[in-house]
Amino acid sequence: MKTLLLTGFAPWDHYQRNAARELLRDQAQMGPQGWRIRCVEVPVSWQRAWPAVAAAWDETVLAVVAFGQAEDDAVRIERFAVNGSSNSAADVDGACFADDWIVAGGPAALHTGLPWRRLEQAVGAAGLPVRSSLSAGDYLCNHLAYRVLYRAAEDPGTLVAGFVHVPTLERMSLGDLNRVRQVVVEEVIDHLEVASGTSARAQA
């Protein structure tokens, strides 16, 4: 079975709901063309975020899309994650990131493995505001994005991985957020199926 792993952050700070988690709630376990969709809620914690994702990342996972929320009016397809995090921003545990690097000895930056141009076009074609972004910030979103991309680069079984920011629920309706997820899931899976020559869309 082929698995697409989707992650979304839990609520934090003054947010009662995190759009990145809410958009995953209605996702079915089975996706198109027999893919299994696995959704994971990620704590906004320097110590607990990555272990929560790593625990769900088994040998069946071929693709990973991590979602985070941002105070922005558009969906942001993040193109890069950098190997460093803020040392002053506390998490839900009251802790701050204390190290110089996210992964000691890792590259200074990693590029998304997602087909970001294709995603940007597809989300826009669905009538939703979208843009690509060069920076996922310096908090947990960038932190997790880097860990995901680093793991994907080391794991020959994971074909694509990356990070997508979505607006808060005050800036985008849950219906539109669900549409973002639907488009991303469909496009990532079709991207992989095209590469393997099994895309139903390509054969239609």
Image: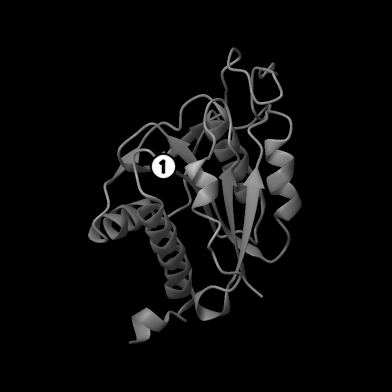
Q: Quadrant of residue 169?
A: top left
Q: Residue at x 66, y 19 (%)?
A: 97
Q: Position of residue 115 (x, y in %)?
A: 40, 56
Position of 57 relative to 17 (above/below): below
Tell me the crowding category of disc 1: few under 14, some 14 to 19, or many 20 or more residues within 10 angstroms, Cα based.
many
Image quarter where the N terminus lies is bottom right
Q: Is residue 99 left or right of residue 64?
A: right
Q: Nearer the viewer, residue 183 or 26?
A: 26
Q: Residue at the top extreme? A: 88
Residue 151 in the image: x percent, y percent? 65, 46
Residue located farthest toward the front when viewing the structure as drawn: 16
Residue 5 position, x and y percent, is 60, 58
Q: Residue at 52% of width from left, 50% of height from top?
A: 22
Query: At 73% across and 59% down in the image, what residue appears?
Result: 58
Color encoding of the figure = one colour
Rendered position, 198 above or below 165: below
Query: Left or right: where does residue 16 sit relative to residue 174?
Result: right
199 sits to left or right of 118: right
- Is residue 135 shown above or below 66? above
- Number of callouts: 1
Q: Residue 107, position in %: x, y?
A: 57, 32
Q: Nearer the viewer, residue 183 or 170?
A: 170
| Front residue (pair 104, 95) | 95
Mark 1 element type: loop
Q: Amino acid at mark 1?
A: Leu
Direction bottom: furthest residue: 204
Residue assigned mark 1: 169
Residue at 52% in and 32% down: 15
| Screen quadrant of the C terminus | bottom left
